Image (tube, rainbow, N blue to C red):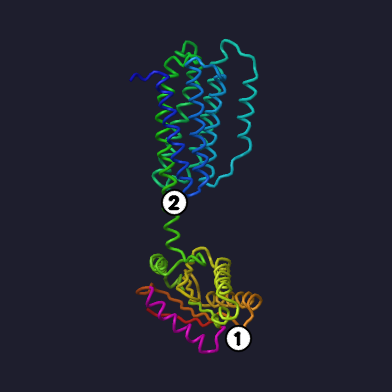
Amino acid sequence: MALDPSTLLILTIALAAAAALYLAVEWGVVRERSLLLWSSGFAIIALGSFLALLRSRGYLLIGIWFANGMLIAAHACFLAGVAWFTRTRLSHRWWLLALLWLVMLCLPAQPWWSRVMLGVQSLMIAAVTLRASHLLRPHGASLSVGAVQLRYVLLAHGLFYVAKAIVAIVPGTLLDLAAFGGAVIRISLIEGAMAIMLIALSMTGTERYRREQHIGQLAARDPLTGLLNRRALKTSAPALLAQASVQHPGAVLLIDIDNFKQVNDLHGHAAGDQLLEALSMLLHEVLPEAALAARLGGDEFVILLQDASTDQVTRLGESLRQGFAHVAGKSFPTPDPVSLSVGGSVFETPPANLESLLAHTDVALYDAKRAGRDRVVVMSVST
């Protein structure tokens, strides 16, 4: 089967429709808006190519520049999807492209006008596509192979349209836009079909990596508080513990909620869950960025710190104790006060393992409980 323009248009329609359907199905599973925007872009390409095919067969249902304008809209959807994926806010100035296109459609046609229109359209698509590629640039090393591939496919696609814009306005170019003839049109259709396949594959690979990454994060988090779970703490702790030194000691805090059972008995387990969530929010507010916080289970929590002195650990524990007492007393009154007992350990050399460090710290927590609860006890650990 010869790759004439009509055949290439049919191939483009099939590929774009398949890509739109696949991305829509993916969106139905993960509900990531970028997938829906990318699916819309491919759907627009399929529709625009279908209108162009009808025109090439003699069915002049709509002007050729409307179909070409849909190609700009499709790439705008690609840009919007990339912006959503990278959490980037696009400037409203991009809407000026749509306004410029509408103004050009209203201008009177001249014999040379089709070349100018094709050149401007190509530059518009190039600008949108290159911007999408640029948005992925800061994320190339930290995301997936799919994201890097998408970046370079969009870059190559955008540069192709820059070249197409230049060639389109060069006198003597083999170009017959109305009949979809000439070398420029044929090459553009072939490149378009290849770009659809590569862009669609890159987009799905990019989103699949993000989905797997999200699943991994969920597996490492306590579902109620969003803090690390015990397994994730064991994985993350060694790197932090290994940084301990005389100049930059490390620290660990064990936290236990006093009289927590009374909250569940008097106010229900939902109230107990709210109190655990309140403590996790308090931890997020007061802990330094490099700290690790985990829920070991029930009402027991652990914090790992780096570069923390005994005084700093004591102040941090007191801040948590006082803040939590205020929230618990105000929200869930009980016969005995609901408070925090905090045991802390400060170490100047990396401990043998996390379990031994927690065992030392548990002694401090026990001392806090035995001394009457609602207090902070911090000790030094020699290893």
Q: Reply above or below: 313 against 204.
A: below
- At a point 42% along the width and 16% down the height, the residue shown is 183
Give the vertical position of 298 relative to 63 (above or below). below
Q: Quadrant of the N terminus?
A: top left
Towards the viewer: 354 or 311:
354
Q: Is residue 118 above or below residue 354?
A: above
The disc, 1 or 2, on the residue closer to the chain's N-terminal end is: 2
Q: Would residue 268 appear left or right of 198 to someone viewing this image? A: right
Q: CA distance from mark 1 to mark 2?
A: 45 Å
> Which residue is the site of mark 2?
211
Q: Find the magenta span and give its range.
A: 354-374
Question: Hey, what amino acid is under mark 2?
Answer: Arg
Q: Which residue is mark 1?
A: 336
Other residues around mark 1 within 10 Å, as few (<14) / some (14–19) / many (≥20): few
Q: Where is residue 253 drawn, in percent x and y?
A: 48, 76
Q: Secondary structure at mark 2?
A: helix
Where residue 301 appears, as percent x and y from the top left, is 49, 74
Chief SS of the magenta region: helix
